[in-house]
Amino acid sequence: MEKKQGRFSVGLTGGIGCGKSTVADMFAAHGASVIDTDLIAHSLTAPHGAAMPAIVAEFGPEFATPEGALDRARMRALVFSDPAARQRLEAILHPLIRDATNAAAAVADGPYLIFVVPLLLESGTWPGQVERVLAIDCPENIQISRVMARNGLQEEQVKAIMAAQVTRQARLAGAHDVISNDDGIEALAPQVERLHRFYLDCAERMAAQPRERL
């Protein structure tokens, strides 16, 4: 993602099941321009999505559903057992995601940008491309129960996904801001409101002094 001069941006991240999408939707309701890289990735691998021809060529037709979408269960099983396969998939998806993210940022008209990036800290590059990193946090046992209920996965599968992400401690250490999501949606609202006001102030200061690093 190319950093846009003069636009204040936040990288929103969190472990699986922490509630990134819920919090992102709340920021969007306040007027922030939210660009979700996970949604972009899903659109690229939807039926006849832009990434599907390359994925089928690389991995074989068995990794596509009859409708032409990515067989996510099959691909998930492969990439979590074969790091080289994960790298091959990322080599296809990441450039497409980057281009789509840049295109969305170019037309965003909110007072500030929020990029939802599940593997923001793992990427090694994203932290330097945003002014603030916001981590959505909750205890790991809550993550596991949420994902099991939402996705129908077994506990071992959820733990395998979590093991591929940075630890909770590392995520908190790498964040400028933290929202705790362990006490229901009512507890999220004041946290989002406080940070929205802070980000608005940051955006105004950055617009006045675009060369200043906040």
Image (cartoon, rainbow, N blue to C red):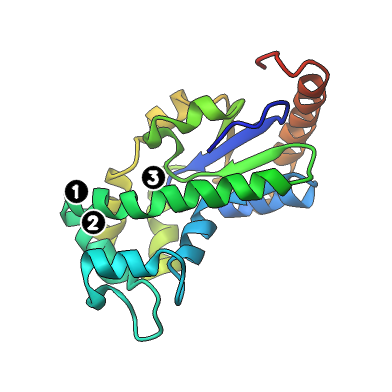
6 in relation to 122, above or below? above
Amino acid on which disc 2 is placed: Val
Q: Nearer the viewer, mark 1 or mark 3?
A: 1
Q: Are marks 1 and 3 in contact (CB under 8 Å)?
A: no
Residue 129 in percent (x, y) is at: 54, 29
Residue 59 in percent (x, y) is at: 22, 66
Please give the residue where the numbered disc 1 appears in the rendered image.
83
Q: Residue furthest bottom?
A: 66
Q: Residues within 10 Å of mark 2 (few under 14, many from 20)?
A: some
Q: Are marks 1 and 2 in contact (CB under 8 Å)?
A: yes
Amino acid on which disc 1 is placed: Pro
Q: Residue at x 77, y 39 (%)?
A: 193
Instruction: In the rendered structure, find residue 140 and report the number of the disc placed on it.
Output: 3
Amino acid on which disc 3 is placed: Glu
Residue 74 in percent (x, y) is at: 25, 70
Q: Residues within 10 Å of mark 3 (few under 14, many from 20)?
A: some
123 in relation to 154, above or below? above
**Secondary structure state at the residue bearing disc 3:** helix
Q: Residue at x 72, y 48 (%)?
A: 107
7 in relation to 164, above or below? above
Task: Indicate which disc, 2 or 3, sits on the residue closer to the N terminus.
Answer: 2
Task: Indicate which disc, 1 or 3, sits on the residue closer to the N terminus.
Answer: 1
Instruction: In the rendered structure, find residue 79 and report the number of the disc placed on it.
Output: 2
Q: CA distance from mark 1 to mark 3?
A: 24 Å
- Asked whether, in this view, residue 116 is left or right of residue 52, the answer is right
Residue 88 in percent (x, y) is at: 25, 52
Q: Residues within 10 Å of mark 1 (few under 14, many from 20)?
A: few
